Amino acid sequence: MRALVVYCHPRTGSFTEAVRDVVLARLAAAGAEVRLRDLYAEGFDPVLSAPEHEGYEAEPANRLPVEGHVADLMWCDTLIFVYPTWWYGLPAMIKGWLDRVMLPGVAFLMPDAVNANIRPGLTNVTRLGVFTTCGASWWLTRIVGAPGRRTLLRGVRLMCAKGCRTAFAAHYLMDSSTPESRARHLDRVAAKMDRFLGGQVRAKEAVA
């Protein structure tokens, strides 16, 4: 298993960081090869520049400004996002990562003489996980439409392998969370990860 974890939070010591650490621990227990992209820590620029936009469809030169991220994306079979939900959606850093890294010829194939629509490019990705926190409640997030979750688990998933397995966990009402609610959520993340990885964690631990 080759897992790419895309992590997004501006501060150290956050609860989102604790969620990330649980995700990484369960991947390690499953014996996965892991690449972590901490977007804030590495100073990732989320802005799609004018030159990048102009050359957006120029394959493979379009990969050059973000070639390391593209290499990670094409390497992995498991793609996991860990981030806080802001205004019901993705932080600008994650959205910018999608804009700049999910390129034609990488995440999707452009229409051509035979195909009128785009086609999946991330057929190497067979697992897609999303772990987030929300200040709003579950019901308010659902009323608004949960745009962040939908972008990743519908939009990105459509570009992945057919039958791509998914996992999702969110701690809602973070502004009124308690130590107990946060501890319960971390347990839930661990359980979700174990199911997501299809028993590989338990098998690895049994051998150990």
Image: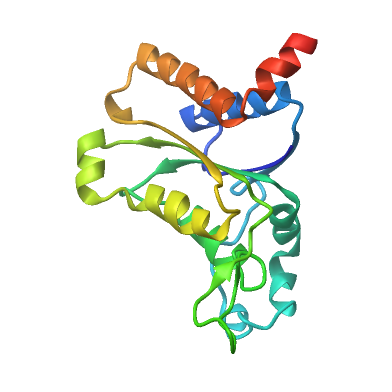
Left of 66 or right of it: where is 7? left
Left of 101 or right of it: where is 169? left
Image quarter where the N terminus lies is top right
Viewer can see residue 13? no
Q: Position of residue 24 (x, y in %)?
A: 65, 29
Q: Position of residue 20 (x, y in %)?
A: 57, 31
What residue is rendered at 57% in x and 76% in y? 49
Left of 175 or right of it: where is 159? right
In-front residue for pair 26/19: 26
Q: Position of residue 151 (x, y in %)?
A: 42, 55
Q: Is residue 5 above or below residue 156?
A: above
Name the image quarter holding residue 121.
bottom right
Image quarter where the C terminus lies is top right
What residue is rendered at 71% in x and 61% in y? 70
What residue is rendered at 59% in x and 48% in y? 40
Q: Position of residue 203 (x, y in %)?
A: 71, 17
Image label count: 0
Q: What colour scheme was applied to this rendering of the protein?
A: rainbow
Name the image quarter holding residue 63.
bottom right
Q: Is residue 113 above or below residue 159?
A: below
Left of 13 or right of it: where is 76? right
Given the current orientation, which residue lies at the most extreme bottom position? 113
Viewer can see residue 82? yes
Name the image quarter holding residue 178.
top left
What residue is rendered at 42% in x and 21% in y? 185
